[in-house]
Image (tube, rainbow, N blue to C red):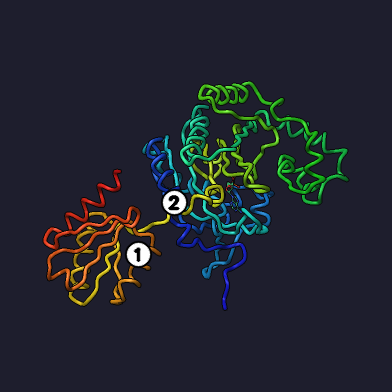
Amino acid sequence: MIRLVRGFKDILPEETGLWQYVEGVVRELFDDFGFAELRIPIVEQTELFARSIGADTDIVEKEMYTFADRSGGSLTLRPEATASVVRAYIEHKLYAKDPVWKLYSVGPMFRRERPQKGRYRQFCQINAEVFGLHDPRADAELVLFLMTFMQRLELSDIELHINSLGCPECRPSFKKALKAFLAGRSERLCSDCLRRRDKNPLRIFDCKVPSCKETMQDAPSILEHLCKDCRNHFDTVQRALEGFYIPFQTNHRLVRGLDYYTRTTFEVLAGALGAQDAVAGGGRYDGLVKSLGGPDQPGVGFAIGVDRVMELLAGRAQEFEKRPDLYIAALGSQAQDRAFEWMQHIRRQKVRTEMDFQDRSLKAQMRRANKLGASYVLIVGDRELEEGAAVLRNLETRKQEQVPVRDLVSIVVSNIRRSRII
Ligand code: AMP
């Protein structure tokens, strides 16, 4: 038997109801917050990711699914969405219509990480990107979005961490302080971090190797090196969150795994997830649009890991399984023909209806109705047709009533609708 590729997964029918629910909630929320959907491709030129995410990052160094195209170019399955969204913003000159855009997208990402609980090689992200706004309230608005989303899903035990990574003005002084701190600690760093120390020392905050993590516990804080503008920006973000009573912690080690961030970064963590506890993360990337060949427009965004949200909601999957409102148990060929016709009319009125095509016994059909979790069963045989009345049974209350065949569709539909309201 050919099996699933390691690190990939199927999302089974008993889970997809919950996925659809979460996607519905987030789309509605994006509408409320004034975002438009952008659909981007799964494949991009490799260079796009190498240039935006950064050559010394784990993603670009080790995790990309890259392959040679038959025509010679190098292509990569997208490991994240921001780079593609920025490319599209530039390529379609969206900025010329209006520099300010609030865009979202939903879809799979690919990273060849070591698979474990909560970490897959294909995973789904919900992404939001805001272009053209320097104002710190744009950063706060995205965090508010995330927290509102978590609330709508009734997720608790959620922590919000925020940080500022400064800007090209103030970061060099922090890098200098960090290099000085690392200078005497070479023997504590892994070989990757030794290499990163000179070129990109901030990356070391992200290293998972225990001795590197331990070393960085005492590292200097970037928050003590922010320039006046970055400090004001960060203060305003914090004030905005406080104004909405959103609890947060500042975490000066939160650099995130990508190079393009400037100023605000944030992460949402859920204790219930265990080792892979980040549900969402994001930040500001003011230089990225320009560095990819676009105008000098700022950007800020986030990504939510949908698989991890699903993990948190797993106990509720059954609530969202799709069940028929009505199951028609038809006995005999005439009754089957009428039932088939009724079923189409009833469905047109948005009542979920199912029937059996196998002309099985009443007992077998009732068993199937129960198995599917139907709310009602309509029982009709050739004899009921002759007598002009079928039987509608409520499977929850066990109550049943006769329904005249002549007005069957409208009566059944209105009965079921009424029971939904109650
Ligand atoms: P990142 O793009 O790395 O900032 O990730 C944003 C969010 O995507 C994280 O907070 C996770 O929830 C999710 N995520 C990242 N990598 C994976 C993965 N390999 N498997 C599952 N979810 C992931």
Q: Secondary structure at mark 1?
A: helix
Q: Position of residue 205 (x, y in %)?
A: 73, 41
* Apparent side of residue 336 relative to residue 85 in the rendered image (left or right): left
Name the residue type under label 1. Ala
Q: Which residue is mark 1?
A: 369
The N terminus lies in quadrant: bottom right
Q: Position of residue 323 (x, y in %)?
A: 37, 58
Q: Position of residue 199 (x, y in %)?
A: 74, 43
Q: Which residue is mark 2?
A: 319
Q: Indicate which disc residue 82 carries.
A: none
Q: Quadrant of residue 399?
A: bottom left
Q: How many marks?
A: 2
Nearer the observer: mark 1 or 2; the answer is: 1
Q: Are marks 1 and 2 in contact (CB under 8 Å)?
A: no
The C terminus lies in quadrant: top left
Does residue 46 appear in the picture of this structure? Answer: yes
Name the residue type under label 2. Glu
Residue ID at (44%, 51%): 319
Other residues around mark 1 within 10 Å, as few (<14) / some (14–19) / many (≥20): many
Residue ID at (19%, 72%): 335
Other residues around mark 2 within 10 Å, as few (<14) / some (14–19) / many (≥20): few
Q: Position of residue 373 (x, y in %)?
A: 38, 59
* Residue 334 vertical placement versus 54 (above, below): below
